[in-house]
Amino acid sequence: MSDGRPVGTPHDELRVWLRLLGASNRIESILSSRITKEFGISLARFDLLAQLERAPDGLTMTDASRRMMVTNGAITSLVDRLVEEGFVTRETRAEDRRTTVIRLTAEGRARFLAMAASHEEWVVGLIGGLEPQARNELSRGLSALRRHLDALGA
């Protein structure tokens, strides 16, 4: 069935999605490059530190995997590096030896807070390049999209 558009012409929705994806990927690439250059850490390890900062009692490996939407194997690899760096501890729960809990160390928390301050400055610089009206419209539009997706159960 044709909607009257020439074959190969993207729908407006597809164009919006491609722009959203492109902008998101570009921002992520810039932030990844900066955090690696400035702090010698991957964006994925920074993201895991951020998750742990929000969980003072620690997270199980499975909870961390769910929050970051990555495999358990990916979390294990990230945790291995963070343990080596002294940023994270890994402990087996006494009541269930199959469960491993990861927590920030004092050094890990201090380093994360320094990284987070720079990260915030970078994000402000990137998004702050938009005119205030455009930034507000984008924020409202993304909020509306999120509500729509939530209503779909997506």
Image (cartoon, rainbow, N blue to C red):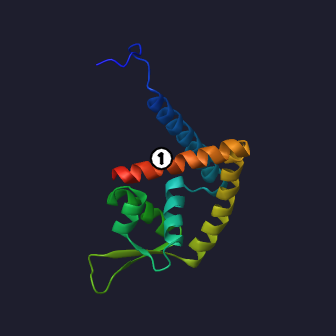
Task: Name the kind of residue labelled 1 in the image.
Answer: Leu
Residue at point 41% right, 16% down?
Answer: 5
* Image: 105 above or below 119: below
80 or 99: which is nearer to us? 99
Residue at point 59% right, 44% down?
Answer: 27
Residue at point 50% right, 34% down?
Answer: 16
Q: Quadrant of residue 79?
A: bottom left
Residue 87 visible in the displayed image: no
* Image: 2 above or below 48: above
Residue at point 41% right, 13% down?
Answer: 6
Q: Position of residue 72 (x, y in %)?
A: 33, 60
Q: Is disc 1 surrounded by few (<14), some (14 to 19) or many (20+) residues within 10 Å?
A: few
Assign the N terminus to one quadrant of the image: top left
Q: Position of residue 81 (x, y in %)?
A: 47, 62
The residue singled out by tag 1 in the image is 145
Residue 4 visible in the displayed image: yes
Q: Residue furthest bottom?
A: 95
Q: Quadrant of residue 111?
A: bottom right
Q: Position of residue 82 (x, y in %)?
A: 49, 66
148 or 27: which is nearer to us? 148
Q: Position of residue 11 (x, y in %)?
A: 44, 26
Q: Residue furthest top?
A: 6
> Relative to 63, is 29 on the left or the right?
right
40 or 20: which is nearer to us? 20
